[in-house]
Amino acid sequence: MTRTGEPAAGRALSEGGSISAFLALLAVALMALAGLAIDGGRAMEARQAANAEAEQAARAGASALSIGGLREGDLALDVPAAIAAAEAFTDASGHPGSASVIGSTVVVTVDYRLPTDVLGIVGIGSLVVSGRGAATDLMGVANGGAS
């Protein structure tokens, strides 16, 4: 018969809960690793989509040419219309962005937060996703049959 409070043969009393603490830490580490794989993959995919969205918005802005300049034979960008077209494109896509014109190039930046699925368990609720695109209209807009 063994008395209560005494360690079992070959085991010290101070090692009683060391396995459960180790397993708890291991579980948290494995969840963080799974979160990096799952949510990190989603973030990489979202970053590529944000870059594509910013590039498309920049192209939409770069197509806003000055009518007065076209009548004079000059290919000039209508800056307010270009910024408005680019920002309207990003608004319509669901991720509002900011546009600017540098010289004759429209530059668009899209920033938003992507909610996490797994990393939220370890305290990371969202990841920042950024995309940037630039476009310059070099040829103007051609109509159907014109060459």
Image (cartoon, rainbow, N blue to C red):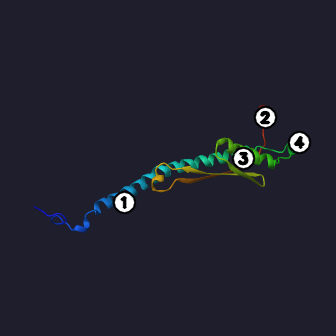
Q: What numbered label is drawn on residue 71?
A: 4
Q: CA distance from mark 1 to mark 4?
A: 71 Å
Residue 7 sits above or below residue 64 on the image: below
Residue designated by label 3: 87
| Number of disc labels | 4
Q: Is residue 9 left or right of residue 33?
A: left
Q: What's the residue at 51%, 48% (across, down)? A: 42
Three-letter amino acid code of the residue under disc 3 = Glu
Residue 2 quadrant: bottom left
Of 22 and 134, the residue lying toward us: 22
Cα–Cα gap, marks 3 and 2: 25 Å
Location of the N terminus (image quadrant): bottom left
Which tag, 1 or 2, sits closer to the chain's start?
A: 1
Query: Which mark is nearer the camera, 1 or 3?
Result: 1
Under mark 2, the amino acid is: Asn
Q: Point out the frontmost of discs 1 and 2.
A: 1
Residue located at (65% from left, 42% from top)? 93
Q: Secondary structure at mark 3?
A: helix
Q: Quadrant of the C terminus?
A: top right
